[in-house]
Image (spheres, grey):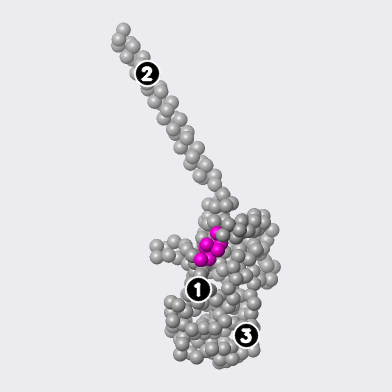
Amino acid sequence: MKKIMFHSLFVVFMVSMLVACGSEGEDTTSASNDSEDKEILKMATSADFPPFESYDTEGNFEGFDIELAHAIANELGYDLEIEDMNFDGLIGALQAGRVDMVMAGMSATEERSKNVDFSKEYHRSGEMLISKPDAEVNSLEDLEGKIVGVQLGTIQEEGAETLSEEYGFEVKKVDDSSVLVQELNSNRIDVAYMDKTVAVGYMDSQGFVGFDDPTTSSPGMGIAFPKGSELVEEVNAILEELEASGKIDELKDQWLSEYE
């Protein structure tokens, strides 16, 4: 009798354990599915543009744009996926549908707006010309006969082409801003023409000197989207919330304050 009772209790115990294990397995699967079901927000950038986007010593993306993009994705409820590419390929990536948005210190020009939609402005820098101290380039008039380097696809490329006609200098185009620094240090160019915030960073780290371009009033930076993207309205609302909460000012203090 005791043997039969023991056997019955053992069977009940084993069934209970199986049910419990099954329940735990179902919960784990459900949690996994919830994570897998979270939408991905694909962003392209050109990570050669500190302090807006670059890599840290461990090879991770960092910078003002990167932090702001994560804040936006979080508000949208998406996981952020970032792809690095040359600046002059960013708009093409949007048009081809490879990415959902671009954040790369991109000025929201009228010309670019023909091919993409922009968010509201989230930062404004201006342009600057930098050189080695012994180049003695202190004004636009000093550029005559010089070689001025610019990054392909940037607003500075457009500006340099226009200025060169009036001030008589040669324009040399390179793929990214870090190459401009190499070109300056190796004397393959005399001057680099770039975003002011980025230029100040290189002046501090490389010992360059420079001056503001007095001829331009460039549009501010915007987040670029494919034409007709529904994200524009949503992201604009989030940018307004982040401005009102002081989050954008906090990120500017963290990443940009020492460059302005």
Badge 3 marks a residue whose secondary structure is helix
Which residue is the extreme one toward the top? 1
The single residue placed furthest to the left in the displayed view is 3
Residue 202 place in picture, x, y as percent? 47, 77
Q: Disc 1 designates what residue?
A: 259
Q: Marks 2 and 3: which is nearer the front?
A: 3
Q: Which residue is mark 2?
A: 11
Task: For the residues labelled 2 and 3, say whether their Cβ atoms are less than 8 Å apart.
Answer: no
Residue 81 in sight here: yes
Q: Amino acid at mark 3?
A: Leu
Task: Work out how far the residue at label 1 is from the one at label 3, CA to CA, in angstroms.
Answer: 25 Å
Q: Are marks 1 and 3 in contact (CB under 8 Å)?
A: no
**Disc 1: CA contacts within 10 A as few (<14), some (14-19) or many (>=20):** some
What's the mark number on residue 64? Answer: none
- Name the dominant secondary structure of the magenta segment: helix
Q: Relative to 157, does residue 223 appear above or below in the rendering?
A: above
| Label whose residue precedes the other's in the sequence (1 or 3) | 3
Q: Earlier in the sequence, mark 2 or mark 3?
A: 2
Identify whether 17 is placed above or below 197: above
- Amino acid at the residue labelled 2: Val
Q: For mark 3, what is the residue? A: 163
As for residue 196 lying within the magenta part, the answer is no
Is residue 161 something one can see in this rendering?
A: no
Residue at image x 55%, y 75%? Answer: 195
Q: Position of residue 105 (x, y in %)?
A: 56, 68
